[in-house]
Image (cartoon, rainbow, N blue to C red):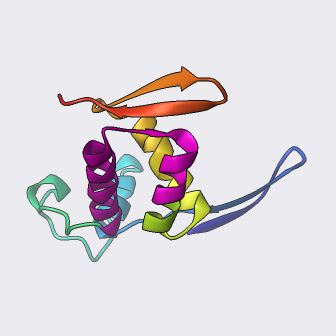
Amino acid sequence: MRIRGTIGALPVDLTVEMDEDDWARLGMQWGTQPANVDAQPAAASKPPPNRNDAVWDIAQELLRKAGHLSGPELLGQLEGLAGSTAAGKRLMVRMRHSANVRVESHGDAPEYFWVES
């Protein structure tokens, strides 16, 4: 699903990817069920491995092995890993909110530290 438009003067171009389980859960929120969904609850079936999860696992391993990286250095590596600047930035946001990552301000750039949980 692609959503394009503006918010005030800012252009918006958003892509939302949903698999069959996502559509089924959305349908349940609306009180409907798509015709091609089995009668079993979505939670009973294990979702297939997601490429984003694999990239996330590699990104975490990268920081874990390094111990700590500066924000620009980490972003550069995540961009290469994810394939684009936008995807690299999404991984950085996810890193910032991870329980295994501590972010400290050091001058102009934050420093990302791996913390074992």
The reply to whether residue 87 is visible in this rendering is yes
Q: Position of residue 64 (x, y in %)?
A: 26, 43
Q: Pinpoint residue 41: horizontal percent, then vertical percent.
A: 15, 56
Q: Quadrant of the C terminus?
A: top left
Instruction: Give the percent coordinates (x, y) of residue 78.
Output: 46, 57
Identify the residue shown where x is 35% and y is 62%. Answer: 52
> Measured from the top left, where is residue 45 in percent x and y?
11, 62
Residue nearer the viewer, 68 or 27: 68
Q: Is most of the magenta stretch helix, strand or loop?
A: helix
- Is 4 situated left or right of 27 in this image? right
Q: Residue furthest right?
A: 9
Residue 77 sits above or below residue 101 on the image: below
Work out whether 73 lies above or below 83: above
Total marks placed: 0
Q: Quadrant of the N terminus?
A: bottom right
Looking at the picture, tell me which residue is in the foreground, 97 or 78.
78
Q: Nearer the viewer, residue 53 or 80?
A: 80
Viewed as shown, does residue 96 lie left or right of 71?
Answer: left
Can residue 32 be seen here?
Answer: no
Magenta span: 51-78
Q: Residue at x 15, y 53 (%)?
A: 43
Question: Is 46 a magenta residue?
Answer: no
User: Residue at (30%, 38%) from the top-left corner?
Assistant: 67
Vertical comparison of 44 with 2: above or below: above
Residue that appears at 41% across and 65% down: 18
